[in-house]
Image (cartoon, grey):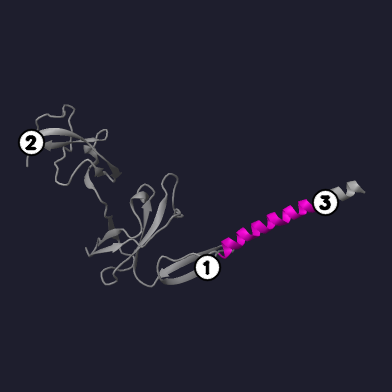
Amino acid sequence: MQTQVTTARNQLEDARGEVTDTQNKLNTLNGRVNGTVTAPFAGTVTVEYDKTGQPSVTLSSDDLQLSTQLSEYDYPKVKVGQELKVTALATKHEQTTNLGYLANTPAQNSKANDSKYELTAPLDGTKFIAGQTLNVMITQTGVQIPQSSVKAGHVYVVEAGKAKRVAVTGTKSNGSFIVKSGLNKGQRVIVDQDKGLKDGKTVETND
C-alpha cells in the first residue's frame, strides 16, 4: 500500500508539472496573440489573413511618409529624431525632416550578412507624391574625406608646404571616411598618397 501511495504521489507531481508547463506555453501564446504594438505614425490599420490563417497587418499613414530601408552596417550611425535631407529625383524638390521611426528587427527581405531595417519620416504633401523616387541624406557630425586618403589609421595633411602624418579615428561610409577626431574643417588632406610620401616631405599643391 505504501508503494502504491508513493507512486500515486509521484504521478500527481508529474501531472502538476505538465499542467504548469502547458499553462506557461498558453500564456506565451496569448501574449503573442494579444500583444500591443505602437504605430510610428497615425493611420489606418488593415488586417488580412492568408490561406493558413496567418494574419498580415498593414498600416496606411494619414499623411505622406518617407519609407525606406537602412543597412545593418549603417544602423549604428542613425537614431530617431536625427535630421534627414530628402530630394525628389524628378522634380528636385527638397525638404529637411526628422527620422520618425527606426525598426529594431530586420525586414522580411533581409539576406544573410546584409540585414535591412525599415525607417520612416514625415514628408510635406505639397512637395512630394506617393511612390516618388527620393534621395535621402543623413546628416552626420565629423569631417568627410575620401576613404582612399586613410592608410593604417593615418592621413597626410599639408602644412607650410610640407606633408604631415596625422592619426585619425572615424567610420567608413560609402567610399568616404567620416573623421571623428584628428582633423579639423579646412585642413588640406593628400588624397592620392604615393609610396615615397613621408612625414616632413615637401609637397606641391595646385591651389
Boundaries of the magenta span:
9-34
Are there few (<14), some (14-19), or many (20+) residues within 10 Å of tag 2? Answer: few
Kind of residue indicated by mark 1: Glu
Disc number lying in front (2 or 1): 2
Q: Predominant secondary structure in magenta?
A: helix
Task: Report the front residue among 130 and 19.
Answer: 19
Q: Secondary structure at mark 3?
A: helix
Separation of marks 3 and 2 at Cα, in angstroms: 91 Å
Q: Sequence order check: which comes first, mark 3 or mark 2?
A: 3
Element marked by disc 1: strand
Is 74 drawn above or below residue 35 in the view shown? above
Check disc 2 and report the residue beneath it: 160
In this view, the mark in front (3 or 2): 3
- Residue 61 in view in this figure: yes
Which mark is on residue 48?
1
The image quadrant that residue 207 belongs to is top left
State the residue position of label 3: 9
Kind of residue at badge 3: Arg
Query: Could you tell me residue 148's position as x and y percent?
Result: 23, 38
Q: Residue furthest top?
A: 196
- Relative to 191, say whether 134 is above or below: below
For residue 135, side relative to residue 206 (left or right): right
Rounded to the nearest angstrom, the CA distance separating label 2 from label 1 is: 69 Å
In terms of secondary structure, where does tag 2 sit? loop
